[in-house]
Image: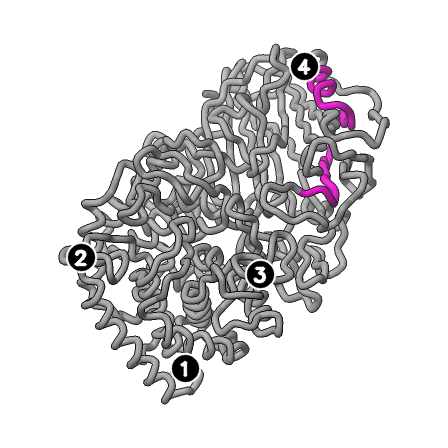
Amino acid sequence: MNKKCLLSLIALFLVSTASDIPATAADAPPMRPPAIPLVTHDPYFSIWAVTDKLTDDWPRHWTGTVHGLSAMARIDGRAFRVMGPSPRQVPALTQTGLDVTPTQTVYTFDDAGVELRLTFTSPLLIKDLDIMSRPATYITAAFCSTDGKPHSVSFYFGAPAALCVNTPDQKVVWGRYLVPGLEVMAIGSKDQPVLEKKGDDLRIDWGRLYLAVPRADATAMAPGDVCRDTFARNGRLPDADDMEMPRPADDDVAAAVVFDLGTVGGAVASRHLLLAYDDGFSIEYFYRKLRPYWRRTGWEARDLLEAAERDYPSLLERCRAFDAELMADMKKAGGIKYAFTASLAYRQSIAACKLVADLDGTPLFFPRENFSNGCISTVDVIYPAAPQYILLNPALVRGMLIPVMDYAKSPQWPFPFAPHDLGTYPQANGQVYGGGNKTEDDQMPVEESGNMIILVTALAQAEGKPDFAVRYWDLLARWAGYLRDKGFDPENQLCTDDFAGHLAHNTNLSLKAILALRSYAWLCEKTGRKLEAKEYLRISQNFARAWVAKADDGDHFRLAFDRPGTWSQKYNLVWDKILGFNLFPAAVARKELDYYLKSQLRYGLPLDNRKTYTKLDWVFWTATLADDAATFGRLADPVFAFLIESPDRVPMTDWYWTDSGKKTGFQARPVVGGVLIKMLADPGLRAKWQGTSLLRTAL
């Protein structure tokens, strides 16, 4: 390779000043995500590659619907495909590398004497909500010569109307906009049914898709196949836009751009573009339409695009620095395989949520159940996702909890336990799961009440103050009373693992209730309720002792109190460690871990003895019970093997079979934020990333 070529095949996620980070891609384990994130902002603007080679298939929305972004390059007059399988007669540029970091995906190609580094940057800088909420991905194409010779290079990119519709028969319209310093093309549905649809397997059909370029040699709005064929043939685009509209999106309408980079030598020549989506209104929250967070001060699409272009150099540098630091700490916490998994989980979790502004500007963060019923703000989805946000920005934990708390204290919610959800995405108008707000049928009373109390306690520790708990004290007291009466030996009911069905006397659910009661005692102490603190501390201590005796099954603990010869992952026990309670003897976790190591299959630890499927997030919670790196790795590393070997090419599933590596259900869900629980359990990393003094003194 020419020494002047500044491009590198070194894996970005290994770049760090830390001396123990491998320096070359050869030191890294094989990286083959089940799906590769390209454009990742929210549940509607979420595009993934689903094949090892970017040229083998079209990119897809997380639901599997084709969102056929395309790219080509011409080198010395010869056309090559870079992204997408069309035109078939055009050969694929040879792909030589792939790196995935928390905010960037980088493909490397090397062919015809030229190296191309194609970078997708979704600047999900979690500590900067203004930036994180911007729905704009940068796509950068950087070329250099690798054979010491000059080469004539041009680059094509196209974005189809499919990104703007739920079904391909919906009609679209398009046009151009004047924004200083940018050439902007926009596509949107004709009818603009804002927030009208709700459900699971849905895509957005309102708002506008924007393809913006600071300087281009040609742009066109025309059928995608015509644009690609024209570029392949002569390096150009159609001379005029196709203005026959409206027409169905499946007529292959696309916005396309061509960059002529001229003669490329050893020095890098690069161009970039912006792919953005403005939905205008994002969430219906108790029948009020809420704006995306980036719009809260009156910004419009023009402001978004101007700011995104202005900030391009600085944001790329910030993303590189953030990725290097976070990846180094991920590796420090759990090893290189853990770092790969956690990096992939980071972006997926954020992209499965939507950050909006309430009417007063308060950030509200709405997670979505992707391919698990489409619910919005499900409490037992917030709970597993929360470690990422407790660690990296507790404001987003507040943003997830506020809507649930406000619903629970409203007259709409009549029960003494916490609700399950707020509706079906994107309409957060009240619970739809089980009996809704009408009956107690198929509710999760112990599950959700325990989740909420534990999360409020974790938030108080992260923020160094219990003011959020004070704001909702009556609710917390009500739920603690319910768990005091109903939590130790749960009745026949569902828990978060509802696919396994109802279960009475669930020992893992009992653990959650006990630790929630201990959490409530802690909150009482921190808010000056001394007598109540002592009472709930006594109750939780008594329950913990009783649990150890009643759940014991010799060399492990049971799935249910009344079922000898059974076992289950006790992932809820991890909060005893994280919150610093030490309520249960250390021998409890050690005995469970020893048993788990004997119960694993090829791709990980089953959820319990009943089936061989598992939950990816819970495996990491269970592994985090270990105090030594070796035990953690023995439990966590099989998940890495699953990710790189699973035949299901979809965004990371959290529910799969540990014997075959096949997906059971679910994909692209926010719960994988729970993978970062290993970092949250590290006091040094927690203090570093939270940037606050921890309010953790014991009673």
| Res. 332 in view | no
- Of tags 3 and 1, the one toward the viewer is 3
Residue 245 in magenta stretch: no
Of residues 275 and 584, the one drawn nearer to the viewer in this rendering: 584
Q: Which residue is the site of mark 3?
A: 431
Indicate which disc, 2 or 1, sits on the residue closer to the N terminus: 1
Q: Is residue 442 above or below residue 415?
A: above
Q: How far apart, in angstroms, are the residues tagged by discs 2 and 1?
A: 32 Å
Question: Label 1: how many residues lie within 10 Å, few (<14), some (14-19) or many (20+)?
Answer: many
Q: Which residue is the site of mark 1?
A: 524
* Amino acid type indicated by mark 1: Cys
Quadrant of the drawing holding the C terminus? bottom left
Q: Secondary structure at mark 2?
A: helix
Residue 222 in magenta stretch: yes
Indicate which disc, 2 or 3, sits on the residue closer to the N terminus: 3
Q: Which residue is the site of mark 2?
A: 591
Q: Secondary structure at mark 1?
A: helix
Q: Which residue is the site of mark 4?
A: 232
Q: Secondary structure at mark 3?
A: loop
